[in-house]
Amino acid sequence: MKITLISPYPDITTFGLRTISAYLKKHGFQTQLLFLPDPHGDNIVFGKDRYEPYTMDEMVEICRDSDLIGITLMTNHYDCAVQITKKIKSALNTPVIWGGIHPTIRPEECLEFADMVCIGDGEEAMLDVANAVEEGRDCTSCGSIWVKSNGTISKNPVRALDGSLDDYPMPDYSFSDHYAMSDGRILPLTYDLTKKFLERGTVSAYLKKIGYQTMTGRGCPHKCTYCINDTIKNLYSGKGYLRWRTTAHVIDELMWVKEHMPYVGFIWISDDAFFARGLKNIEEFCKEYKEKIALPFSCLASPLTLTEEKLDILVDAGLLYLQMGVESASKRIQDLFNRSTMSNDRMMKAIQIINKYKDKMYPPSYDFILDVPYETDEDKIESLRFISEIPKPFRLQPFSLVLYPETKLYNMAKDDGLIADDKRDIYAKSYTMREPSYLNLLMTLSKGGRLPSAMLKLLTAPGVVDVLNSKALKPMFKNVYLGLQKAYRLTKGLGGRQ
């Protein structure tokens, strides 16, 4: 019984897929991993195939002796998964199952191409499917699995979250039967090629260290209307979705990494809400981490869960870089996002706490969401004025809003007629596709945290905005914005080839 697991994600970390692979191996199954990073990256072109024909031919040969093929995807990888599945179906008689965020929220749409979809967490469900396929049984009774057969769909309820995250082994980094696409060709994912991929990670590039990305928990305590976390949480009636691995379980993984991947220079903890851990839990983690791992690390924070007491302990243990979601400084948009408890005062208090450690950490990153359909120019200006008050040094990460299906904000926009075509307006949109406007240009110029605060205040003054953001000057600023964007991509491309 051989199972191939495929990821079109932009990097090769893919924590969930690697964990499923390790869990299947633990139960005696043979797996191979195939990483096919979307060649378009953030520059998605609607209606265009993502992969070259020769890449798909190579993929088929790797999958040829598989008994089951699984594909993980988010919404913006939908076209990748469709192309991969069509090619597999045209060449092989192997069942294909889709899993991940998009199949969880839109299973029937995914069953137009896949034979099965997995809804919610995948480890236990994939083990059930693997056992059924090996034994020649159908999968119509497997929990969390929807199956299409002879034009009908068997819909099984989502499995209860009754297991501990410690039941799952560390992600599969065996370097055995792992493949990755590089420059269109599919190559064995060797130790050295893995190192090269990890060097390209966004945080790795910023810190100029090679990062190993892991997750110490699943879920998020917040209920932001633009985020799919809240939708997933509701699958489980809001109960038990926020879970943590024990400190010992995480430390065991990281000790393996130190021994087998000595080039790793920092640990990238990508939990949605690492600071939501209790203080005693953080104290325990930091004590063990400092004694046994002693590498710099990064993590995410939110204004509601960050405290000086927690941050002090984490910095002492090696916290080097922090990313926090501000999203908007407009009270009206904060209400729209269901983030009214994260007021400007609360956010600035958290920022000032972070700034106390500026001599011990890299400049932190603060996330902002742009291009919100309900946003006015005044809402945008409020965010820019808030930025002018942020103490330096800092970085900004502006993200264009993608209205992911089945989020509360998506449903609102759909009801209000603001989404004409899901596949064009959402599936083929990246968060880097910001509207080229004067106010977004100011956000872009503020990204490095070097634009003088006084200048940003001047450029957002009422009279100045009235002129520079006028209809007459919109074409000019659009061209300036697009020109800067093109120059940045060219510089980034040249840097990647040096």
Image: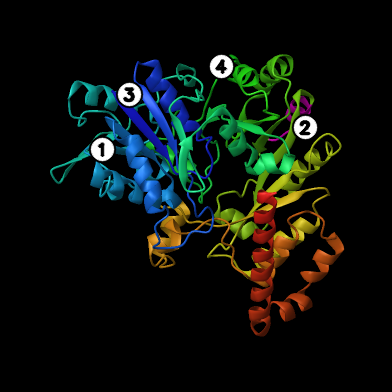
Type of amino acid under label 4 = His
| Dot label at residue 127 | 3
Give the residue drawn at x 33%, y 28%.
3
Considering only order in the chain, which callout, 4 or 3, is on the residue closer to the N terminus? 3
| Dot 1: element | strand
The amino acid pointed to by label 2 is Glu
Is the residue under label 4 in contact with that under label 1 (CB below 8 Å)? no
Q: CA distance from mark 3 to mark 4?
A: 21 Å
Of labels 1 and 2, earlier in sequence is 1
Instruction: Label 2: state its secondary structure.
Output: helix
Q: Is residue 252 left or right of residue 118?
A: right
What's the image's color scheme? rainbow
Q: Residues within 10 Å of mark 3 (few under 14, many from 20)?
A: some
Q: Residue at x 67, y 70 (%)?
A: 483
| Residue 458 image offset from top left, x and y in percent | 82, 70
Give the number of the mark in front: 3 or 1.
Answer: 3
**Local SS, label 3:** helix
Q: In what quadrant of the picture does the N terminus appear? A: top left
Q: Which residue is mark 2?
A: 308
